[in-house]
């Protein structure tokens, strides 16, 4: 059994000195921060923010290009909504609801979303 310590809204499991399990919001924030530099290098503007004032807190990731506004919202219960809109036409380019599990690879789960963004650059 690994030592456990309770943190607000998250259970961390210490395994050989590393955090092996993070809450979904924390995992998404870590992923978003790692992804930010690569996205900004393509000319996208990226902002991540925590929206904790709720019974189901969320992390919102806004991604903007010259032609697209997009958002990924992940709630602490694992619910996720991704959307992208074309600025000029107001047409919806992408919209998807899904449920994330703690072992999801965000790069795999969100590939269609990022493919939709890359078509509009």
Image (cartoon, grey):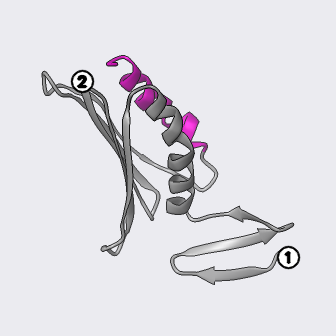
Q: Provide residue 69's location: percent of width, then percent of height.
A: 26, 35
Q: Label 2, secondary structure: give it.
A: loop
Magenta stretch: dominant SS?
Answer: helix
Left or right of 113? Residue 22 is right
Q: Provide residue 85's location: percent of width, then percent of height.
A: 23, 31
Name the residue tied to disc 2.
Answer: 67
Q: Provide residue 40's location: percent of width, then percent of height.
A: 44, 34
Looking at the image, is 3 positioned above or below residue 75? below
Highlighted range, magenta: 105-121
Q: Residue sitting at 47 percent across and 33 percent down?
A: 39
Q: Are marks 1 and 2 in contact (CB under 8 Å)?
A: no
- Residue 21 is inside the magenta segment: no
Q: Provide residue 50's location: percent of width, then percent of height.
A: 38, 63
Image quadrant of residue 97? top left
Name the residue tied to disc 1.
Answer: 1
Q: Residue sitting at 60 percent across and 56 percent down?
A: 102
């Amino acid at each position: 059994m690994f030592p456990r310590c309770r943190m607000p809204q998250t259970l961390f499991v210490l395994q050989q000195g590393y955090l092996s399990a993070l809450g979904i919001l924390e995992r998404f924030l870590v992923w978003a921060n790692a992804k930010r530099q690569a996205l900004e290098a393509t000319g996208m503007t990226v902002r991540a923010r925590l929206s904790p004032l709720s019974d189901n807190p969320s992390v919102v990731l806004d991604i903007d290009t010259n032609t697209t506004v997009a958002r990924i919202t992940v709630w602490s219960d694992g619910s996720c909504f991704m959307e992208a809109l074309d600025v000029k036409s107001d047409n919806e380019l992408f919209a998807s609801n899904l449920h994330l599990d703690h072992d999801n690879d965000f790069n795999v789960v969100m590939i269609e979303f990022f493919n939709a963004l890359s078509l509009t650059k």
